Image (tube, grey):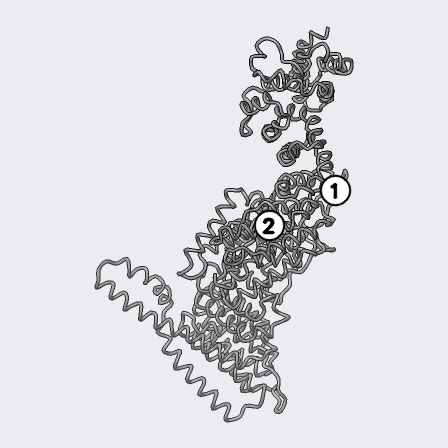
Amino acid sequence: MDATVTQYGNALEAMIEMRPTVGTVTLLLKVSRMLQPYYGKLAEHERSRSIDATVQVLRVYLDRAEDITIGIASDFGPLSSLLARLSPRLVDSLALVRHQSLAAIHFAFRLANAYKVWISPYVISFQSCFFNAWTLTFRVMALIRTQAYFALRNSAKLIWTVKDVWIRMMLKRLSERWLKQVIYVVNATFYIREVIEARLPQCQIQTYLSALFEMLTDRQSQVSSAAAQLLTHSLTCRGDTLVHEADTLVTTILARLPEVHSCVQTYTDLLAALVAFAAHQQTVVCDVMLRQPLPYSFVFSCKCDVYVLRQLLDAWECVSRERSLFTPTLDYLLELLTGALEQPYDIMDTGGGNSVKIVHVEPCQYTAGITEVIKSGEPDWSLNERVPTLLAALFHMICSVSDTQFPVVVKENKDGEHFNIYLIFKQTRTKQPLIITPELRRSAEKPAGLAVAALKILFSKLLFHFGILVVLHYRTHTSAVIEDMNQARGWTECLDRDMFIDSITVLVRSLVEHRPDWIEPLARAVMDKASNEREPIRLAAVIVSSALVRKSPDSSGDFNEKLLVGCIRLLENSLSDQSLRIRKVRHVLIIPSLTFQLCVRGLGELSECCSGAVADRFASMAVEAAMGGLDDLGDRNDTVAMESIISLNKLVSKTNDSQLHSILRQVLLKIRPCFEKVESGALRAASFSLFGELGARVGGDEEFMGHLHANIVAILLHLNDEDEDVRKACSLTLNQVHSLFGVGTLSSIVEREMKGGRQPFSYSAVQRDLASVLVCFPSSGGRRSTMNNDYYHSALSFPDRVNQYALTCSNYFKSSNARIRANAALLTGHMLGVLTPQLRATISKDLIFSSLVLLLKDPEDVSVRIAAAKAVGSLHDFS
């Protein structure tokens, strides 16, 4: 075998001597695959012989080279490949391989110098000294064994598990010896990388890096680790010059991470290379990582058939934990998200006049990236300074994608393909990667779920933020914010297109109480974009401003009048906004500005005085805004009307008398139709509540009394409404207006049966008693016993209203709600059944009775027919 190897070497020498050019050397080393493929073989003799043959080829070529011209400088082509493949071999487990690798590197550098200038005696002398020094170093390293590194890793755990003191002492000494040996290996990589960076031409850096990537998968972990360290150093030194190769480099690093994951040292060194390159090409690194499929905890590559569970998360973590990269990375992602929200979705026609909004990939990518940076970044004051900006961006995200959904099918390029690079500088044609994966649709549910996840991570991260002296204070307050959102189901409701406004309001008001130092910067961040062309961006500004009207603190939690005035002015300017959602929100928000009670620490009555002045200052404008909402032409679903009525309900107590009387007739006319909005129980409840508040405020005003008599029937009918809120509102309204009738018996019934707004025990009995009071004479028999002696005097108060009440009841016979029809039938019977002959003559009998007969045949509900039969039974005196 030795003779065969010798003859093999002689043949290589002969080939070089026949044609001593760099092309022959390149052919023997790489193209013909005669030598380089064997550098990483598992068999020691294969590695040793291939590298020894490489040394022989380089030595002969150095002596016989014919293509080196004096005075003409050029580059030695194979230098980069030799350095990348042999430098990691300096830590090979076989001492002979380490020695031969150093010799090959020595000849490669000599040839490189020869190509630059003809070798002078000085250069030869310098190179000889360089070679002798390295030879001596690696002869010492020949004592190192492969097991030293692994034993060192395991010894620390073993030392603390052994109870015998003597054995523990020996293991500690042994580990120290192994540590010194490992340091030799690290020093070898450290010194050679400095020499390479000083001598490797820039034009060969691509080939050098490509070969280093191939060395990452070497069978020896120390060799692959050395390759990763050399890669890290090259990217550290030359990262700013690798502009055109940056995208491919990052893509390749991410593709190699799963392949080296089993080798911990190589894996960490490769992540260090990514961080080193990010220091020079931070935007490119972020862009490439953002292009990976979502969610980052579950990435599937159809091309390589590999599941990546942790590698991309580790990449984000390493980049984020680098303090010099955390701030610019977060700012860059926020800038990208802001731009992406200018057009975050496409509208897709689903047929039949329907359409859906399909979210773009970019907002999802950037929000997921922000989440990882927040989660993995080192928490310091720079994060706290950016919390308001982060909150504003995430609010914009939620508002922009609240009514969108994930795409089911990813659009492809025109040709359906694109170039996806997995090996550095080698392009392979693959399908476009799937970024919105089925796993993301299952985990995030809706696009807004990505922003909600970012908010959760942000507040969770801040639980462990700041220094020791203030950590308990801020952890308590930040946890209180999370608790407020949990109790209000805010995280879940943020995903609802109709309820996310309330959820954001809950979050902002919780921040007002627990983190007032963020409020003013947050308000400024959203208010700066209040005039943005996009409706969701303006909507976020209105939501935040509305939440701050109730209480506007400064950084210390004290009352901030300037902020409050700014919020109200913004809402005032939004009155003419073309968006229905914003017109709706503005009414929700402007109400608390006039009913709020500022709870400012340490100020007491002074804060109350200041809040009252601000409320009086803007009361007129708030009332006008609410009145304008009642006439909103674009309010097809009565959403703005409901919010306006709720607003007026709270504004009544703050409005001055002159303004209240000027709008009284218009308000009363506007809310009367709202009593019968079958499709909205909330609107009915708000309307009855406003009617009661107006009665409590204006008292016996002639205008209001006319509407009171016109609406008392509606109040009595809806006292048994299907909606509990409506029933409660009617009960409260009766408590507020019963005294205006001036009938003691009516007041005693209301106070006895419905005091404080509670529901009557028996609706039928209460309706019978109240109906008897509203007409002229009490019913006979036992029912009269429920009345007091004032009854006979008070019953004669409204004889002229009897026919009006009866006709109003008959109008409800056609209600679309079965319960209201039944209530109207019973009320008709209770009122008309106790009338005197004189009053019976005033009743429009034909109209009322014909309508009542139709209820006996009601096709929908048997309860209506039963109620109609009872009413007919009460009308025997009309026969």
Tell me the kind of residue under disc 1.
Asp
Quadrant for the N terminus in the image: bottom left
Report the mark closest to the observer, 2 or 1: 2
Residue furthest right in the image: 846
Q: CA distance from mark 2 to mark 1?
A: 23 Å
Q: Residue at x 72, y 40 (%)?
A: 662
Q: Nearer the viewer, residue 44 or 787?
A: 787
Dot 1 corresponds to which residue? 632
**Mark 1: few, some, or many residues within 10 Å (few <14, many ≥20)?**
some
Q: Residue 85 in the image: x percent, y percent?
A: 51, 72
Residue picked out by circle 2: 549
Write down the quadrant of residue 734 in the picture. Answer: top right
Instruction: Categorize mark 2 by other alpha carbons within 10 Å: few (<14), some (14-19), many (20+).
Output: many
Numbered label attached to residue 335: none
**Residue 637 location in percent, x, y?**
71, 37
Q: Between residue 422 and residue 734, name the one nearer to us.
A: 734
**Quadrant holding the C terminus:** top right
- Work out whether 52 lies above or below 574: below
The answer to whether residue 351 is left or right of residue 327 is right
